[in-house]
Image (cartoon, helix red, strand yellow):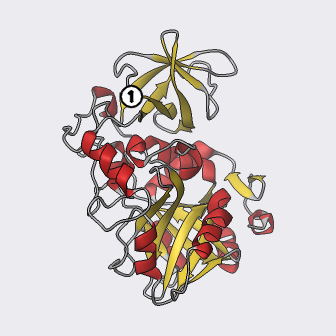
């Protein structure tokens, strides 16, 4: 995205063409959650797939059942390697003629390249759409972009058809987050920037990401490394259909789900906020003197303060404080279980801990 479209945003902090924030990330978070702001998501990109075979073809390649996907229904897919490790992820919506894939920016070209190699003789065409921009917010807030814009409504944390929840269902913190993303032309972004004068607030990716972390929502650019499998991040909820036809990596998905006990598991961390220092991605998480995992995402949340997601080994203690490495030294953190050690087809859904039942500001 050209930063030229963002110059009209007062207080904008722009890095590598991405609007990090528009002056006050905490205020922007509150406005996004309330539906009075729209985030400019320059860290996303768009891949389109057209052609009569597009949905059945994507169905055969990915973890999600897409062959009968109705128009305008949001879902998501994962591309796995033969061992079930996550290679690509995309948010998916089809408008009846085009399948729109919203992808983390660093994965746009790799995903499009892989899909292009897999076309064979099918009636599909894959394109990277550098002429488009992704904006996010509540579905009601995004009504301002018009009905013509492809709109992906995030299904998280619902358990979609064929999916399975490892973490809690009732009381899940993601239930408080209504989120959607729309694909718009650059001229529409210019209009949205100009519309600030009439009361429409704009936000940056930092605010959007803080709401995501608070909702325990996994993302390819943060929770995925070269070992990640869907089970570890509770991603079977929305990105995997356990009873669809064969696809690459399906054997591992089924085996780990049926036997249970994925090798790692995602946890949420509420960090001691006294030092006001956030850890970086990859920071060590320790239980006592033992390194049990590493941080995947961090944020300073407008209600919850400093928070993080981390992948820890299955056998890490599920109770008690842990410490997280920061540039200022170790920081204590209270942990919440997202994926329990025994996660699998036969494991019960965990109850929400008292920490998760935190009051929400009104």
| Quadrant containing the N terminus in the rendered view | bottom right
Q: Residue at x 59, y 49 (%)?
A: 221
Residue marked by disc 1: 314
Mark 1 falls on what kind of element? Answer: loop
- Above/below status of 146 relative to 330: below
Q: Residue at x 31, y 51 (%)?
A: 254
In the image shown, does 146 or 318 lie closer to the viewer? Answer: 318
Instruction: Locate residue 343, reporting x and y percent.
Output: 29, 37
Instruction: Locate residue 225, reporting x and y percent.
Output: 57, 43
Q: Residue at x 46, y 49 (%)?
A: 83
Residue 10 left/right relative to 153: right
In the image shown, does 54 or 206 lie closer to the viewer? Answer: 54
Task: Identify the image quadrant of residue 281.
Answer: top right
User: In this view of the protein, can residue 106 be seen by the observer?
Assistant: yes
Residue 53 left/right relative to 11: left
Density class for disc 1 (Cα within 10 Å; few <14, some 14-19, many ≥20) is many
| Quadrant containing the C terminus in the rendered view | top left
User: In this view of the protein, can residue 43 be seen by the observer?
Assistant: no
Task: Identify the image quadrant of residue 331.
Answer: top right
Residue closest to the far top: 289
The mark total stands at 1
Residue 187 left/right relative to 181: right
């Amino acid at each position: 995205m050209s930063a030229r479209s963002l110059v009209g945003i007062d207080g904008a902090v722009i890095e590598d063409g991405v609007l990090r924030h528009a002056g006050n990330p905490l205020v922007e978070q509150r406005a996004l959650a309330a539906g009075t702001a729209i985030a400019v998501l320059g860290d996303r990109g768009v891949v389109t797939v057209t052609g009569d075979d597009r949905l059945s073809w994507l169905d055969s390649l990915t973890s999600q059942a897409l062959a009968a996907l109705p128009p305008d229904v949001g879902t998501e897919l994962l591309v796995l390697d033969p061992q079930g490790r996550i290679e690509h992820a995309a948010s998916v919506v089809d408008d009846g003629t085009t399948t729109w894939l919203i992808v983390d920016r660093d994965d746009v070209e790799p995903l499009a390249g892989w899909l292009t190699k897999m076309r064979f003789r099918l009636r599909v065409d894959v394109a990277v759409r550098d002429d488009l921009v992704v904006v996010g917010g509540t579905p009601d807030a995004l009504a301002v972009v018009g009905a013509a814009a492809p709109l992906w409504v995030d299904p998280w944390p619902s358990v979609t058809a064929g999916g399975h929840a490892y973490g809690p269902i009732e009381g899940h913190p993601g239930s408080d987050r209504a989120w959607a993303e729309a694909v718009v032309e650059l001229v529409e972004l210019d209009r949205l920037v100009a519309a600030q004068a009439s009361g429409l607030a704009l936000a940056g990716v930092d605010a959007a990401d803080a709401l995501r972390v608070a909702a325990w929502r996994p993302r390819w650019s943060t929770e995925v490394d070269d070992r990640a499998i869907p089970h570890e991040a509770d991603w079977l909820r929305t990105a995997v259909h356990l009873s669809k036809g064969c696809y690459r990596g399906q054997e591992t998905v089924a085996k780990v789900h049926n036997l249970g006990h994925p090798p790692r598991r995602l946890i949420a961390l509420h960090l001691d906020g006294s030092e006001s220092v956030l850890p970086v991605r990859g920071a060590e998480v320790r239980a006592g003197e033992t390194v049990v995992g590493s941080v995947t995402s961090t944020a300073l949340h407008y209600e919850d303060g400093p928070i993080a997601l981390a992948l820890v080994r299955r056998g890490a203690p599920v109770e008690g404080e842990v410490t997280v490495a920061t540039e200022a030294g170790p920081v204590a953190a209270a942990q919440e279980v997202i994926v329990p050690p025994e996660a699998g087809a036969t494991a019960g859904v965990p109850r929400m801990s008292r920490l998760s039942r935190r009051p929400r500001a009104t």
